[in-house]
Amino acid sequence: MQRHGEEDLKAANQATLRQGIAGHYARLLRIVRSRGVNQDDAADIVQDAYARLTVAAERTEVHNPGAFLHVTAINLIRDRGRASISRGLSAANEAPPEDIACPAPSAERLIIGRQNIEVLERALGELPPKRRAALVLYRFDNMSHAAIAEQLGISISMVEKHVRLALEHCRLRLRQAGDVIDE
C-alpha cells in the first residue's frame, strides 16, 4: 500500500515539474547563447540541464525548476570550458601562464550568488501576482511592455509601474541582505 502512495507522490512531483519548466526552454537557450556558446552546443547544454533536473526531481522535490535549470546550465557551460581548457593544456603539454585569471568565480562569489538568488526568490514571492508576472515576463521572457499589457489585461503604463515597483522591491531586499547583484 505504501508503494502505491510513493508512486502517486512521484507522479504528482513529475506533473508539478512539467508545469514548472514549461516555457523555460527558449529563455534558457538565449541565456546559454548569450554566454558565447554556439547553437548546437547550447541546445546540448539545455538538454543536459533538463535531464539533470529530471534526475534531481526523482530524488527530491525541486522548489524552483527555473532557477535549477539556470544554475545547472551555467555550471555545464563552465564544465565544458574547463574540459576544453584541460584538453588544450594536455595537447600542448605545458602549464598555464600564471597571469591568466581563472574564468570560474571564486567560492565566495558562488555563495553570494546563491544567497542573492534566495533573496530574490523571497522578494518575488512577496510581490502581488500581477506585479510579479509583469517583472518575470519583462526580465526573463524579454517581452515588450505592450505584449505584457495585452497578456495581463492591463495598460502599458500599469505594466511600466509594476515593473518599476517590482525592481525597486527586489533591489531593496538585496540591499537589506547586504549585497547587490550587478545589473
Image: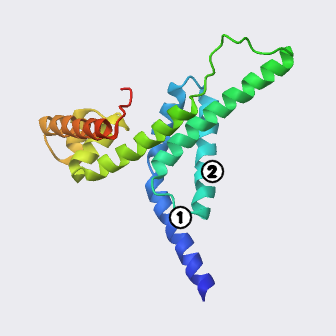
Q: Secondary structure at mark 1?
A: helix
Residue 45 in percent (x, y) is at 62, 38
In the picture, the disc for residue 51 is: 2
Q: In the depicted view, which residue is nearer to us: 175 or 9? A: 175
| Apparent side of residue 87 relative to residue 8 in the rendered image (left or right) | right
Q: What amino acid type is highlighted by mark number 1?
A: Gln
Q: Residues within 10 Å of mark 2 (few under 14, many from 20)?
A: few
Q: First in sequence: mark 1 or mark 2? A: 1
Q: Quadrant of residue 35?
A: top right
Q: Quadrant of residue 97?
A: top right
Residue 164 in percent (x, y) is at 20, 34
Colour scheme of the rendered structure: rainbow
Identify the residue shown where x is 54% and y is 77%: 8
Residue 109 in percent (x, y) is at 51, 32
Residue 68 in percent (x, y) is at 51, 48
Q: Quadrant of residue 98?
A: top right
User: Compared to 57, does 25 lie above or below?
Assistant: above
In the picture, the disc for residue 142 is: none
Alpha carbon of mark 1 to alpha carbon of mark 2: how far?
A: 13 Å
User: Compared to 174, does 1 lie above or below?
Assistant: below
Q: Residues within 10 Å of mark 1 (few under 14, many from 20)?
A: some
Identify the residue shown where x is 80% and y is 19%: 89
Which residue is disc 1 drawn over? 14
Identify the residue shown where x is 51% and y is 58%: 62
| Apparent side of residue 26 relative to residue 147 in the rendered image (left or right) | right
Q: In the depicted view, which residue is nearer to us: 125 or 40? A: 125
Quadrant of the drawing holding the C terminus: top left
Identify the residue shown where x is 57% and y is 63%: 60
| Apparent side of residue 167 relative to residue 53 in the rendered image (left or right) | left
Q: What amino acid type is highlighted by mark number 2?
A: Ala
